Amino acid sequence: MTSSQSRCGRWTPLSILAVVAGFIVWWPLGLAALGYTLWAGPVDRLADEGAQKLREAFGRRGPTFHKGSGNAAFDAYKAETLQRLEAEQAEFADYLKRLREARDREEFERFMSERKTQS
């Protein structure tokens, strides 16, 4: 990579915005942003490297624990357990919904009875 290629790659929209905003806010801040843009590496490359590391750590679809273990019996047990947990989670969510509805109904009935006594 030649110096002209690396220097042109540093002027990303983010770096231009940082320099302009720096000069708008306070001119020494703009000079600092300009100096950083000229002498440091591009910010986008750092973000791309970070995103690549996350993809490698968690895989394309999610954390690595979703992959098969290679043991068919264990994978079947794990799938059955996950299905059971999802069913329990759905039941618990329904239970919480019914509790909220009962509480709301009780509060509304209390409001209506207080309103009738005030009238």
Image (cartoon, rainbow, N blue to C red):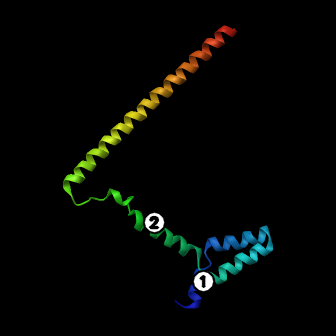
At x 49%, y 73%, the residue is 49
Give the x, y percent position of residue 59.
Answer: 38, 63
Give the x, y percent position of residue 75.
Answer: 24, 53
- Residue nearest the viewer, comparing 75 with 36: 75
Give the x, y percent position of residue 113.
Answer: 61, 12
Report the side of 97 relative to 28 (left or right).
Answer: left
**Quadrant in the rendering for residue 109:** top right
Question: Label 2 belongs to which residue?
Answer: 54
Report the side of 62 relative to 109 (left or right).
Answer: left
Q: Is residue 61 above or below residue 1?
A: above
Classed neighbour count for the residue bearing mark 2: other residues with Cα under 10 Å, few (<14), some (14–19), many (≥20): some
- Residue nearest the viewer, comparing 105 with 77: 77
Return the disc, 2 or 1, that comes first in the chain's sequence. Answer: 1
The amino acid type of the residue labelled 1 equals: Cys
- CB atoms at circles 2 and 1 under 8 Å apart? no
Give the x, y percent position of residue 67.
Answer: 30, 59
Question: Label 1 belongs to which residue?
Answer: 8
Q: Is residue 2 above or below residue 38?
A: below
At x 66%, y 79%, the residue is 37
At x 54%, y 24%, the residue is 104
**Quadrant in the rendering for residue 22:** bottom right
The amino acid type of the residue labelled 2 equals: Leu
SS for dot 2: helix
At x 48%, y 67%, the residue is 51
